[in-house]
């Protein structure tokens, strides 16, 4: 099951790469998709929201929370 999150502050591919790298280190084996154009990340399989928040914020970005499923 995948889950998407809002991440504010990503403005370029470098930002997306930093978020992706941090998440891959925290969630080995997960598929991480970062879309800088709409400020979203998608993680499969879904993980703990608090962990995602901590990783995103530690990478220097603003965590906007999970997006509604659908």
Image: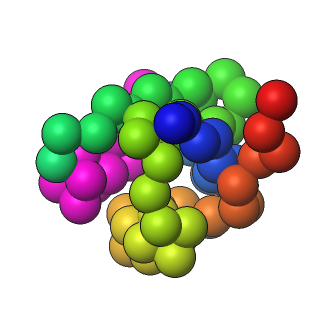
Q: Most extreme residue toward the front, as rendered?
A: 1
- Which secondary structure dominates the residues rendered in magenta? helix
Horizontal and vertical percent for residue 29?
18, 39
Query: How many marks overall?
Result: 0
Relative to 12, does residue 57 appear above or below in the rendering? below
Between 3 and 62, the one nearer to me in the picture = 3
Q: Quadrant of residue 16?
A: top left
Between 31 and 60, the one nearer to me in the picture = 31
Magenta-drawn segment: 13-27
- Which residue is at 53% across, 36% downward? 2
Q: Quadrant of residue 36?
A: top right
Relative to 65, does residue 51 appear above or below in the rendering? below
Relative to 58, does residue 12 appear above or below in the rendering? above
Question: Is 6 within the magenta?
Answer: no
- Which residue is at 51% across, 36% downward? 1
Relative to 55, does residue 40 appear above or below in the rendering? above
Q: Is residue 14 visible?
A: no
Question: Is 14 within the magenta?
Answer: yes
The coloring applied to the image is rainbow
The C terminus sits in image quarter:
top right
- Which residue is at 23% across, 46% downward? 24
Q: Is residue 27 visible?
A: yes
Horizontally, residue 30 falls left or right of residue 49, namely left
Horizontal and vertical percent for residue 6?
69, 49
Horizontal and vertical percent for residue 56?
46, 62
Horizontally, residue 31 falls left or right of residue 39, namely left
């Amino acid at each position: 099951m995948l889950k998407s999150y809002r991440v504010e502050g990503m403005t370029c591919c470098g930002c997306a790469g930093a978020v992706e790298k941090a998440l891959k280190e925290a969630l080995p084996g997960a598929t991480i998709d970062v879309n800088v154009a709409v400020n979203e990340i998608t993680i499969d399989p879904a993980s703990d929201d608090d962990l995602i928040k901590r990783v995103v914020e530690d990478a220097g970005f603003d965590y906007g929370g999970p997006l509604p499923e659908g």
